Each structure stands twice: as structure tokens, then as C-alpha cells.
Image: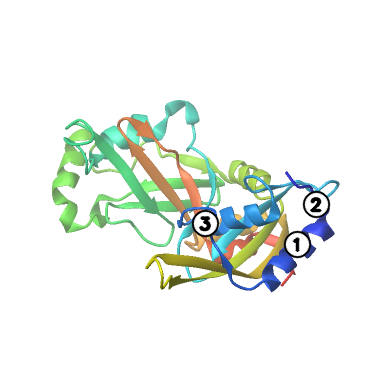
Amino acid sequence: MKIYTKPELIAALRAIHERGWIENTTRSSNHGAIGNLLEDLLEITENNLPLPNSGEWELKTWRRKSTALLTLFHIEPSPTALKFVSAMLLPSYGWAHREAGGRYSEHEMSFRQTIYATRYSDRGFKVVLDDAARMVKISFNAEQVSPRHADWLESVRVRAGLGELNPQPYWGYDDLGYKAGSKLKNVFLIGADRRTQTDPLTGLKREFFHYNHCLMLSQFNAAHFIQLLADGAIYIDFDARSGHNHGTKFRLRQNRLPELYEQIVEVF
């Protein structure tokens, strides 16, 4: 793997930017293709940047016209010993998995949804910030459940009742700040545009990326993270089924990432 000093990395990124449209010939076309191609161009693995004497830096890429969410980190709600998602939310508030009776057994349950602080999900869940207790909590309100989930709501009444979650899953502000700060210390955020064209000989689509926006982000601010949660800009994503919990993710609109940092330097 190639090793860069910070000035050398900046020069390499600028050189890639100046090449204009670059064909993606090394990997399949998917949401990670922009990052995968950039790693190949830089001759590095994963997104960890070997920058001697420059602290820990990560490389994050985003498709500039995409509305996809960026996964910041995985962290299960507290108290973690209770295994809230698999032991409480899934059996008491889950619903039949869409592949139950097919790929999975007929009893396979799912608890998969993305929630945030500014409105209830159609199943009545919401992120609530308790500033006094310095906690981010998950709340359930049966009155906010969409009528199309009436049968599911009746099953919840039988399994758990229709009151507030008790106990409520939560994350402490300090725990989230530490987790986010350790994962997102310093970041090179590179944005790219994408276009495709059809090869006249083969009829196959060719994919091209233009890396045209780069920011250096440092001095992570935990208070900004909590504020973005309160604003509904950071989402909590549950992805569990009876056979496996894929983990609870904190996710963010990609173009909002700079708001988490005190120092922002535009490279190009």
C-alpha cells in the first residue's frame, strides 16, 4: 500500500481531480464504486489513509447528486446487556419478514426501519432527545401509527401493550460523542459526479466519475452531532430479523457531514 504525507495526498487528489472524467473499469457499479475506484487510483486499501505524523484520517466519498445516507457508525442502545433490539423490539414490536415462508421460516420476524427526531415513523417510533438526562431515547406512540398498520398495532397491543416503551432504549450524549469522535476524527470528504455512456460496439454501459469536490474536515464537535440529531438530520437505522441483527446504525445525509466539524478546508 502506498504511503503519503499529507501534502503528497493533497497533490495526488488534485491530480485525480484534474484528470476529469475517469472510467470505472476495476469494480462493479454500486454505491461504493466511487470510493473503490478512488482507493485504486491512490493505491490504498479500505478507506484508512497512511499519513505519517498527521494523526488518523479517513477517506469518505459521496455521489454529489445522490440522496443516499452515509453510515457514521454502529452502536447498540443502552443498557447493552439487555440486547434491546433482539430481546425487546423484535419480539414485541416486530412484524412478519417479507420473505417469511420463503427464504426464511414462516415465523421469521423483522424490525427494520429508519427513524429520526422531527416526526414519527408510520409505525409510531421517533427519536427523542432528553437534554436534562443527556440521553437520546427511542419513543413509541400508538396514536401515531398509520391506519395501514392496524393489524400490526393490534398484535403489539397483545404482545406488549400500547403504552410507551418500558424501559426505553437510549444512548448517552457522552457515549455518542465519544463513539462519533473516535470514528470521525479527521476526514477527507471527496465528492464526485457520475455519468454513463453506451459503448457503440458492445452496447454495454460504461461508467465514469469526476472527482470535483474535496474538503479536509477536522476538530469533530460532539455538540454539533447532538444538534443534528435534534434537527432530524441524523437518522437511527434498525435492521434486525429473527435470525440476525445487522446492527443499529447512525446515518447522515452525505452533504451534511461538514457540519460536524470545527475546521473545514477546501482542497478543490
Name the disc covering residue 20, or none.
none
Q: Which residue is tagged 1?
A: 12
Q: Can you give x and y, in whole percent of width and height, for residue 130 in the image?
A: 50, 50
* 75 in relation to 62, above or below: above
Q: Residue at x 55, y 52 (%)?
A: 131
Looking at marks 3 and 1 on the same chain, the residue that comes earlier in the sequence is marked by: 1
The residue carrying pointer 2 sits among few (fewer than 14), some (14 to 19) or many (20 or more) residues within 10 Å by Cα, namely some
Horizontal side of 79 relative to 156 (left or right) equals: right
Residue type, mark 1 in image: Ala
Real-space CA distance between mark 3 and mark 2, rounded to the nearest whole angstrom: 22 Å
Real-space CA distance between mark 3 and mark 1, rounded to the nearest whole angstrom: 19 Å
Q: Can you give x and y, in whole percent of width and height, for residue 207 in the image?
A: 48, 66
Q: What element carries label 1?
A: helix
Whether residue 130 is visible to the viewer of this picture, yes or no, is yes
Looking at marks 3 and 2 on the same chain, the residue that comes earlier in the sequence is marked by: 2
In this view, the residue farthest toward the top is 81
Q: Can you give x and y, in whole percent of width and height, for residue 71 in the image?
A: 52, 51
Q: Can you give x and y, in whole percent of width and height, for residue 214 in the image?
A: 68, 67
Looking at marks 1 and 2 on the same chain, the residue that comes earlier in the sequence is marked by: 2
Q: Which residue is tagged 3?
A: 33
Which is nearer the eye, 117 or 260?
Answer: 260
Residue type, mark 2 in image: Tyr
CB atoms of marks 1 and 2 within 8 Å: yes
Q: Which residue is tagged 2?
A: 4
